[in-house]
Amino acid sequence: MKITIVGTGYVGLVTGVCLSDLGNDVICVDIDKEKVKKLNEGIPTIYEPGLEELLTKNIKENRIRFTDSLKEGVEKSEVIFIAVGTPQSDTGEADMSAVWSVAESIGKYINGYKIVINKSTVPVGSGDKVYEIIKKNMEGDYKFDVVSNPEFLREGSAISDFMNPDRVVIGANHPAPADKIKRIYEPLNAPILITDVRSAEIIKYASNAFLSVKISFINEIANLSQIVGANIVDIARGMGLDSRIGDKFLNAGIGFGGSCFPKDTMALYSTGKEFGYEFKIVKAAIDVNKEQRKRFVDIILKHYNNEVSGKNFAIWGLAFKPNTDDMREAPSIDIINSLLEKGARIKAYDPVATEEAKKIFSDKIEYGENCYDILQESDALIILTEWNEFKQIDLNRVKESLKEPIIFDGRNIYDIEYMKELRFIYYSIGRKKVG
């Protein structure tokens, strides 16, 4: 099938590459000419495991190419995916300006029947507006359909998520476009749910908001556990063995970040307000998530009697989660800024997110080449992202490198008993202090 993807950000690029690997003829459109040049050369513009290999393979087999011409993409395709960003506005709603702009251009360039798919995460009712904008800007009398096909990609495992999805959701108000889009996904052998457009739009927001609530809930239980001396790891395990609850998203820590959960949860809350409904549980999850970062900083400050001016802290992990370089809404940003405001000095290491972090922190902090070199002359180690390389580290070497054997672990990656054995002063989330 001839497919155009508009937008080569995280969702658009992964979707385009994977659809080309399924045998489709894919054109990816982006207004950034430098990005288009790199992608045509097989150079990914985001970090995602497995992406570069798949991109190179499908470029060589002439199944995917990149252009800055939206006109070309619209005219030469049967199906057009809108995969541009919908960032959070200052007031919490999704900023839909890029989606509306693409819809306007599709209307301008349409030259026959098209299926236009909202792949971007959009508020309920967006499909109707996309239809209106295309219709308004058409110069001829062409038929087209607008479909919602939300993405459920997790950064760090997006290729696998696309190729092995839990489900594919197709929101269409007519059977014909739904059947055509269904054929695109049939090779994946995944459950395919066909709904109306508005239901599909809500499914994405509801899914992310529910997971956000689950994370904030376990963090609240962790906060209580820390106060009363219980162990959140055991508690989460006990909860997760209940098949009604499940063990996913029950890892206590410093809260969620990234491009989806914070934005989508806030957007759902804002959508509710727009229609006169207040999501009280969703609002609580947002508030708890913000507070969780502050609580972690408070643990550090309390250890030093609220005086960290002049202290040197080594930080492992800057990205909001492992296996990505994404710094959007990363907890590390708030935590590092809070410590800098108190006069602390920061040396940080992340396996892939350093360049993205430099765009945020510039030269306010130092950056290391590996996880050991930043430990020298550091008063304590702070862990903010649970990269695998940190989990099996030589902790004796860590202990020898630090001025004092102190670790503040925001991701609970080490065993309490082992830290006692090594005689660390060890703080984690929802567990007793060691040492």
Image (cartoon, helix red, strand yellow):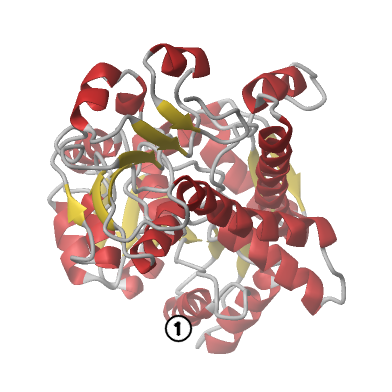
Residue position for label 1: 108
Q: Residue furthest right?
A: 276
Q: Is residue 23 left or right of residue 357?
A: right
Q: Considering depth in this image, is 421 or 391 the residue closer to the camera? A: 421
Whether residue 227 is visible, yes or no, is: yes
* Above/below status of 129 relative to 268: below
Residue at the image position 53 percent from the left and 85 percent from the top: 138
Whether residue 121 is visible, yes or no, is: no
Q: Is residue 314 left or right of residue 112?
A: left
- The image quadrant that residue 368 belongs to is top left
Q: Is residue 69 left or right of residue 185?
A: left
The image shows residue 312 at horizontal and vertical percentages of: 25, 50
The image shows residue 227 at horizontal and vertical percentages of: 70, 37
- The image quadrant that residue 130 belongs to is bottom right
Q: Is residue 186 left or right of residue 14?
A: right
Q: Considering depth in this image, is 332 or 169 the residue closer to the camera? A: 332
The image shows residue 268 at horizontal and vertical percentages of: 71, 64
Q: Residue furthest front?
A: 305
Within-10-Å neighbours for mark 1: few <14, some 14–19, many 20+: some
Query: In terms of secondary structure, where does tag 1 sit?
Result: helix
Residue at the image position 18 percent from the left and 65 percent from the top: 363
Residue at the image position 55 percent from the left and 77 percent from the top: 89
Q: Amino acid at mark 1?
A: Lys
- The image quadrant that residue 136 belongs to is bottom right
The image shows residue 241 at horizontal and vertical percentages of: 74, 16
Disc count in the image?
1
* Above/below status of 431 relative to 141: above
Residue at the image position 82 percent from the left and 25 percent from the top: 244
